[in-house]
Image (cartoon, rainbow, N blue to C red):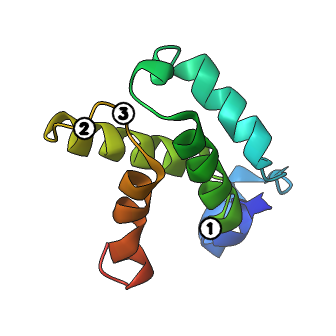
């Protein structure tokens, strides 16, 4: 769950005067649907398994769609510089590797 109010300073909370808005995390299948809706041409660039891997990875971290978009766009950026035809799981794994080591 994402609770934006808990991350605010007390001064800000008191001025806004609202109850907490809590968003339920997306399931990886919902993240896949978001990719398909937002990027209808994804099949031209991404192997289906790589999209599933990306969605599962994001769902396991925090289910934040902004993070999904960040890694999706990073995969596209890296892919444009490579000669591979489709983005594979190994390409997605390469994006997460530095983060898992605490570098990203």
Q: Position of residue 94 (x, y in %)?
A: 35, 63
Q: Quadrant of the C terminus?
A: bottom left
The residue that label 3 is drawn on is 86
Q: CA distance from mark 1 to mark 2?
A: 44 Å
Q: Position of residue 87 (x, y in %)?
A: 38, 39
At mark 2, the secondary structure is loop
> Is 62 in front, or is 97?
97
In this rendering, the answer to whether 73 lies above or below 92 is above
> Residue 84 — which label?
2
The residue that label 1 is drawn on is 8
Q: Residue at 53% across / 14% down in the picture?
A: 40
Q: CA distance from mark 2 to mark 3?
A: 6 Å
| Of the image marks 1 and 2, the number of the one nearer the N terminus | 1
> Is 92 in front, or is 8?
92
Give the class, few, some or many, for how many residues have Cα within 10 Å of label 3's Cα (few <14, many ≥20): some
Give the class, few, some or many, for how many residues have Cα within 10 Å of label 1's Cα (few <14, many ≥20): few
């Amino acid at each position: 769950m994402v609770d934006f109010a808990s991350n605010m300073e007390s001064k800000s909370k008191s001025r806004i005067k609202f109850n907490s808005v809590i968003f339920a995390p997306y399931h990886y299948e919902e993240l896949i649907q978001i990719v398909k809706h937002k990027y209808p041409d994804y099949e031209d660039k991404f192997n289906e398994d790589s999209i599933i891997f990306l969605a599962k990875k994001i769902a396991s971290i925090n289910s934040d769609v902004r993070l999904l978009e960040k890694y999706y766009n990073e995969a596209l950026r890296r892919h444009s510089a490579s000669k591979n035809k489709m983005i594979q799981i190994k390409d997605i794994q390469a994006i997460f590797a530095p983060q898992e080591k605490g570098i990203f």
